[in-house]
């Protein structure tokens, strides 16, 4: 009878471990950042809401990157994926700012769904202009929230969070809004509408 080829106990991983929660959501640790506990708590709360909305915006971009169709499929497919990638960078930046302040970043998508203010899209496929409008509205929710949060965290002295919201969240969001909005201008593709009738030349 051959010996089972099992490595000794000291080489085995400890599997199926379950630990207690060591920091509750909504609390902050004492990090010596020159910011009050109140300031850090407030910033984490505002950042987590924007983090959740940004995670939803990222997934909306991916959904529409996959589902978009029609004559502008290729350019929109590429543009929406580019914007998704930029939003994903923001997700990481926002989450790590929460951690930097001693807080707990929202990480689970089911938690994200509970916190976000961005409306849920249908599970099926909308028409492309409705997809783009939905993205514009999601952007505006985040931009309005970020403008308000940026001003309030600055009053608490949290310059780092203010800078992140203005330089990253707001500037990226504004630029992406522009690129999307231009696709919703009903402009002639081939023949200029010089007399306002768009009728074929006689
Ligand atoms: Fe893709």
Image: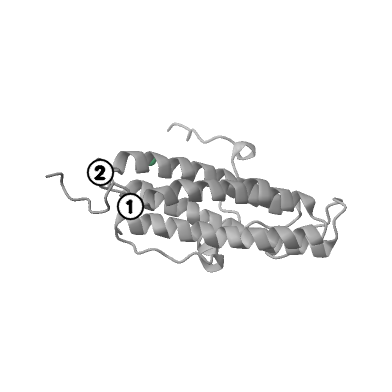
Badge 1, how many Cα within 10 Å: few under 14, some, many 20+?
few
**Residue sitting nearer the eye, 24 or 82:** 82
Q: Is residue 12 above or below residue 117?
A: above
Instruction: Return the residue at label 1.
Output: 186
Q: CA distance from mark 1 to mark 2?
A: 14 Å
Image spot of residue 101 (x, y percent):
76, 53
What residue is rendered at 85% in x and 50% in y? 33
Badge 2, how many Cα within 10 Å: few under 14, some, many 20+?
few
**Residue sitting nearer the eye, 22 or 91:** 91
Residue 64 appears in the picture as rendered: yes
Instruction: Return the residue at label 2.
Output: 71
What residue is rendered at 64% in x and 58% in y? 146
What residue is rendered at 74% in x and 64% in y? 42
Image quarter (top left, top right, bottom left or bottom right) of the C terminus? top left
Left or right: residue 141 compared with residue 59: right
Q: Is mark 1 within 8 Å of ligand 1?
A: no
Q: How many marks?
A: 2
**Residue sitting nearer the eye, 189 or 47:** 189
What residue is rendered at 69% in x and 64% in y? 45
Which numbered disc, 1 or 2, marks the residue closer to the eye?
1
Q: Is residue 201 above or below residue 44?
A: above
Locate residue 78: give its quadrant.
top left
Image quarter (top left, top right, bottom left or bottom right) of the N terminus? top left
Marks 1 and 2: CB-CB under 8 Å?
Answer: no
Image spot of residue 51 (x, y percent):
60, 56
Image spot of residue 48 (x, y percent):
64, 60
Give the SS element for disc 2.
loop
Residue 108 appears in the picture as rendered: no
Give the SS element for disc 1.
loop
Q: Quadrant of ligand 1?
A: top left
Q: Is residue 146 above or below residue 192?
A: below
Q: Earlier in the sequence, mark 1 or mark 2?
A: 2
């Amino acid at each position: 009878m051959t010996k089972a080829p099992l490595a000794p106990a000291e080489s085995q991983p400890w599997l199926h471990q379950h630990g207690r929660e060591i920091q509750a959501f909504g609390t902050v640790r004492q990090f010596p950042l020159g910011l009050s506990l109140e300031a850090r708590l407030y910033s984490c709360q505002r950042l987590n809401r924007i983090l959740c909305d940004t995670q939803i915006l990222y997934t909306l971009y991916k959904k529409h990157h996959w589902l978009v169709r029609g004559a502008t499929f290729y350019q929109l497919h590429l543009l929406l994926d580019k914007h998704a990638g930029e939003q994903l960078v923001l997700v990481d930046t926002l989450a790590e700012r929460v951690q930097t302040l001693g807080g707990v970043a929202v990480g689970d998508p089911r938690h994200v769904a509970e916190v976000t203010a961005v409306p849920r899209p249908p599970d099926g496929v909308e028409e492309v202009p409705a997809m783009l409008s939905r993205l514009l509205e999601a952007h505006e929710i985040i931009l309005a929230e970020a403008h308000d949060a940026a001003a309030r965290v600055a009053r608490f002295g949290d310059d780092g969070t203010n800078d992140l919201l203005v330089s990253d969240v707001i500037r990226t969001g504004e630029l992406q809004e522009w690129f999307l909005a231009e696709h919703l201008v009903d402009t002639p593709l081939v023949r200029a509408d010089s007399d306002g009738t768009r009728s074929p030349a006689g």
